[in-house]
Image (cartoon, helix red, strand yellow):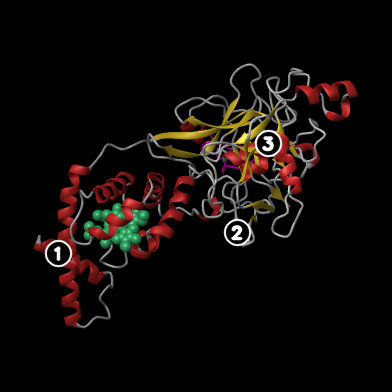
Amino acid sequence: MRKLVIAAAVAALAAGAYIHKTHNELLVEMKKETKVILMMMQRAFDSKEAIEPRINTPVVDDGVAVALGEKVYNSQCIACHGPKGWGDNPMFPRLKGQPYQYVINQVNAFASGHRSGGNAVMMQAVAKNLSKHDLYNVAQYLEHADMDTATLLKPIEGFKLPGSGQLQDTTETVGEDSDYPGNLPSFTAKGDIVIDNNTGLMWEADNAGGKTMSEAQEYCRNLDSGGYTDWRIPSIKELQTIILYRNSKPATDTRVFKGIPVLGPAGFWAGPVLQVDNNTNTGWHIGFPDGHVMLYSADGYKNTRCVRSEGGQYLIAQLSDNGDGSVSDAQTDLVWQQQTAPAMKWEAALNYCENLSLAGRDDWRLPNHKELISVADYTRMSPSIDPVMFPETNTDSFYWTSTSDVTPEGNKLGHTFLRAPQRNEEVTSLIKIHNEMAWGVSFNEGGSWRYHKSGEYHVRCVAN
Ligand code: HEC
């Protein structure tokens, strides 16, 4: 053991750690170093018992987990372990390059008290406060700390959030989706790829077929199409941008997006992949019959449509608190009501937002389906929204969107729901009577579903 200590000290000397120290200072440092090394060896021995089987296959989410882990690291670990886990100070072990499972086991051992004594108290406090989620991501980051993750969480430059595409009027009450069309959806098809003129995202025109999440990720990583090789699975927010909520079965523009099953399952994969409570890898999908956003086990099968972007992605809202009861998102240019309004029926929600006067403005309205999804945070749950920017967000129920459900289930006119410009008055009045459902979003996990308009759900208004 003495040999090891000396070897470590020599290595430290060689690394230049003590270059400016006097002989005496050096001795004091070496004694400290000895203590630390002895402790670490003891612990390495102790923690053998704590080794658990790998909790899951690594979360290879095209770097998203790594990028999220970097955020966790930079806010909760960097002060002690130094930039990128280098461990510049001998008191704090180097973490960079440690295997995923090792970091998880050690942090769990600190949290359970299994690893204790010496400086472990510092880590015990950190470990107890670290969520499972953050731990998995930070462990991913430490294993791959050399990756350039900065671009993955950056917003896409020039990004514009497309409107929902809904054209149908379902009520005389002002404030429904079709009253605020926003940026009109616009695509350019070029051979095998489709460019979204609002978001700047480039899509594979065709469906790459049914795959598990990891197969889909691998397929996109290896794809060489349109002269590009940086394809990935889309984030859930990105995938939703190509939905057109005026259509159903499928709810998109089939002139440019090919290969969507009309009879069979038509869900498509999206990220990020999360470790949900029971430690299973879980991804996202959008059901293209109607455009619903939902979690799905990563081992299941969904369709695959790859995407790429010039740096950055549409995933993390760029929020700032305006200090007047409103929150701005620099990525979508939307302004949000910070507080949650009480539960109410859908028409009442339209009225509530139209009449709201807040933060010196009165142009509030009920957000459409894409807008409400834009403010969700898909890197966390319960709530799946930034809890500092939006305190006391309700996670037991849903929030209304202004977007009506136009599927046969939601409008009893069946599949022949006509576009507004094409229909006569008789059809218009039938639609008013029969259009019963609208979309709601849950901020427990971020999914969306169709709810009866007479149900009472929460409201958060938007303006721009
Ligand atoms: C307040 C300072 C402090 C912070 C903050 C901190 N650590 Fe530590 N960490 C330590 C100390 C001190 C040790 C050595 C503990 C010991 O001597 O048992 C350690 C040890 C570890 C170890 C064991 C390393 C090994 O090789 O034995 C891991 C893993 C670890 N920390 C991960 C983290 C992660 C992940 C974070 C951020 C979420 C973090 N630490 C934040 C102080 C800190």
Q: Residues within 10 Å of mark 2 (few under 14, many from 20)?
A: few
Q: Mark 2 vs mark 3: which is more N-terminal?
A: 3
In this image, 123 relative to 194: left or right?
left
Which residue: 60% across, 55% down? Answer: 318
SS assignment at label 3: loop
The answer to whether residue 111 is magenta is no
Query: Decide: marks 2, 3 in contact (CB < 8 A)?
Result: no
- Closer to the camera, 307 or 329? 329
Name the residue carrying label 2. 320
Question: What label does residue 5 carry, if any?
Answer: 1
Q: CA–CA distance between discs 3 and 1?
A: 60 Å
Where residue 80 appears, x then y in whole percent? 33, 64
Query: Decide: marks 3, 1 in contact (CB < 8 A)?
Result: no
Q: Amino acid at mark 3?
A: Ile
The residue stretch that appears in magenta: 220-232
Name the residue carrying label 3. 242
Where residue 40 appears, x then y in whole percent? 19, 57
Res 95 seen here? no
Which residue: 36% across, 59% down? Answer: 85
Which image quarter has ligand 1?
A: bottom left
Vertical position of residue 400 compared to residue 44: above or below:
above
Vertical position of residue 120 compared to residue 238: above or below:
below
